[in-house]
């Protein structure tokens, strides 16, 4: 599955001002992402605490607008 196909399946939720607030993706894509993440974390032997810390930092980065284009995030992921 290529990035154009993924973009066509992803839906964005917006607030009253029209700003994106959430993303809806098909369950099959989500399961693939989780599977890939599990493989990566197993391979890296990250501790649960480190994963939680990384997730918290990701949320902070997102709130501060430190985001990446979707195409860049999907590089190297074969769905």
Image (cartoon, rainbow, N blue to C red):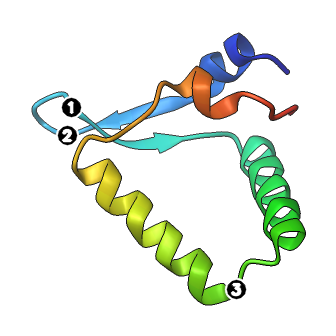
Do the CB atoms of the residues marked 3 and 1 lie less than 8 Å apart? no
Do the CB atoms of the residues marked 2 and 3 lie less than 8 Å apart? no
Which residue, given by chain and number where applicable, does mark 3 sit on?
47
Q: Of discs 3 and 1, which sits in the foreground?
A: 3
Q: Residue furthest front?
A: 44
- Residue at 68%, 31% in the rendered image: 74
Q: Quadrant of residue 39?
A: bottom right
Which residue, given by chain and number where applicable, does mark 1 sit on?
19
Q: Secondary structure at mark 2?
A: loop
Left-right relation of 76 to 72: right
The first of marks 2 and 3 along the sequence is 2
Distance, label 3 to label 1, CA atoms, is: 35 Å
Q: Secondary structure at mark 1?
A: loop
Is 33 placed above or below 60 here?
above
Is 27 placed above or below 41 here?
above
Q: Nearer the viewer, residue 30 or 74?
A: 74
Q: Quadrant of residue 1?
A: top right
Left-right relation of 60 to 39: left
Residue 15: where, in percent of width, then height? 19, 40
Q: On residue 29, which mark appears?
A: none
Is 78 placed above or below 40 here?
above
Counting the numbered discs, the total is 3
The quadrant in which the C terminus is found is: top right
Distance, label 2 to label 1, CA atoms, is: 6 Å
């Amino acid at each position: 599955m290529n990035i154009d196909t993924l973009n066509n399946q992803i839906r964005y939720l917006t607030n009253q001002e029209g700003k994106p607030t959430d993303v809806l993706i098909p369950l099959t894509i989500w399961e693939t992402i989780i599977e890939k993440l599990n493989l990566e974390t197993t391979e890296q032997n990250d501790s649960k605490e480190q994963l939680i810390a990384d997730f918290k930092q990701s949320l902070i980065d997102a709130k501060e607008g430190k985001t990446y284009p979707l195409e860049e995030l999907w590089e190297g992921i074969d769905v």
